[in-house]
Amino acid sequence: MVKRRQIGKLLIANRGEIALRIIRSAKTLGIRTVAVFSEADAKSLHVAAADEAICIGPPEASKSYLNSEVIIAAARTTGADAIHPGYGFLSERPEFARAVAEAGLVFVGPPAEVMAALGDKLAGRRIAREAGVPMVPGAESASPADIRAFAAREGYPILIKASAGGGGRGMRIVGNDSELEVALEAGSREAKAAFGDGRVFVEKYLARPRHVEVQILGDAHGNLIALGERDCSIQRRYQKIIEESPAPGLSDSTRARMLDAALALGRAVGYLSAGTVEFLVDGDKFYFLEVNTRLQVEHPVTELRFGCDLVAEQLRIASGERVSEVGAPVGAAIECRINAEDAANNFRPAAGTVLHLATPAGPGVRFDSHLEAGLEVGSHYDSLLGKLITFGASREQARRRMVVALGEFALLGVMNTAGFLRDIVASEPFARADLSTHFLEEFFPRWHPAQSDGIEAAMVAAAMVASGAFGTRNGRPAAPAAAAGPATTARRSPWDELSGFELWRPR
Ligand code: MV4
């Protein structure tokens, strides 16, 4: 008998666009919402959007969004009966999920024991192997001798990976026997430093794979469904920047086998809530990578194709209900993550004030963001400003809509990656879906904005200042102090020295 528990009030233990995203779905379900915020986020949109809000500490994440005690205390103080962790922060910490449950609250996500079982890469590989999920040929690193024997059998190059890690930290490519000892040492040392656990394992190195992941959704009634796949190959330093669904060029049979494998793994652990099973794809072969036991940043591309609300599904599951009936997927969707980074200067983190924001719209355009004019964007947290998602009947229609939408997007006052993303999506390699995890190094090893971007931005700013949008100083039009901060895509241009005001300059 499944325990049903009505969620009356939900605390969202996160910030930015995902906090706003969760609040919206909770409200739609008639659930009251509690936002938590650090002092740096006091004026953020998610605080205003929630029914209640409570400050949980100073800007440092360790003293606010990563402070599980203060978050659980905030739930008690406000009378919340459930906590949604979002992604990042505490979303994949089994000890947090356990503490929430022990406090008598509902954790919106998988149970702590499922999270723990899949959180360790080696343990996850064992579960996948026992579930018959294809794995990259590999070996658990018993010793250099064992690994040398593995390499003799499978051939070089091989890849050394951290068991406790993710995101590429601790990874070392080994091209031959002579490099092995040093690489093992270095990989294990980096893993120990990064994760407090130096265990490593090895796999045959796939030279040009794609990263394709499967969305799964499980309830307490034994229902477990796969909601298609997402291709997330276009990454920079293991951070996804563009995701899409369906994975281009994947045959129906490969797709069916991949979804079946993801479900077999989910069933093996009794998966609950939303989760993602990651694979490497090499031609028509796929290999298990790891499981993410949280809702992912890129979940909207799945929502648009299946016409579902994954946050609402998580809340239904957490209250003991069944997952909704979901139809067959339609069309294609693409997501671009717009980050506060300077793409023309090694993606240096950017900060500033949102002086002007124009958000795209139109058929098949969705913009998930907490941005609004006047918002101070700092660099306390990750650089995500918002996600632009487009949907179309075909990939080409979704792609064209993305190019147009990125062209409509304007953010003055905070340097951002919209121009970079637009050039990628408009490019021929992207249009022909020549995707792999090496896409950026192959096709966009460096990037500079078109000069026109700078002039357009400067013209908008000039018009705003001339219109008195920023008041006057000493009787003259005054650009705001923040305007002296980083520009958006504005670059040095003939408009820089415009009479009557000082235009911001790229740093
Ligand atoms: C691999 C691989 C090639 N061969 N494993 C990178 C981080 C971690 N999630 C696994 N990763 C990879 N594992 C084998 N045997 C290439 C990568 C990889 C990668 C994987 C997915 C998405 C982006 C990537 C970028 C670089 C390397």
Image (tube, rainbow, N blue to C red):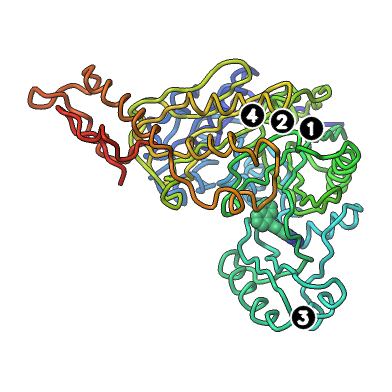
Q: Nearer the viewer, mark 4 or mark 1?
A: 4
The residue carrying pointer 1 sits among few (fewer than 14), some (14 to 19) or many (20 or more) residues within 10 Å by Cα, namely: many
Q: Are marks 2 and 1 in contact (CB under 8 Å)?
A: yes
Ranked by sequence position, the earlier of labels 2 and 1 is 1
Q: Is residue 57 left or right of residue 229?
A: left
What kind of residue is marked 1? Leu
Ligand 1 shows up in which quadrant of the image? bottom right
Point 77% across, 40% down: residue: 214
Label 4 residue near ligand 1, CB within 8 Å: no
Return the residue nearer the eye: 483 or 264: 483
Q: Nearer the viewer, mark 2 or mark 3?
A: 2
Point 58% across, 45% down: residue: 88
Ranked by sequence position, the earlier of labels 2 and 4 is 2
State the separation of the CA atoms marked 2 and 4: 16 Å
Residue 202 visible, this angle: yes
State the separation of the CA atoms marked 3 and 4: 48 Å
Q: Is residue 400 left or right of residue 2?
A: left
Residue under label 2? 302
What kind of residue is marked 3? Ser
Ranked by sequence position, the earlier of labels 4 and 1 is 1
Return the residue nearer the eye: 190 or 301: 301
Residue under label 4? 399
- Image quadrant in which you'd find residue 456: top left
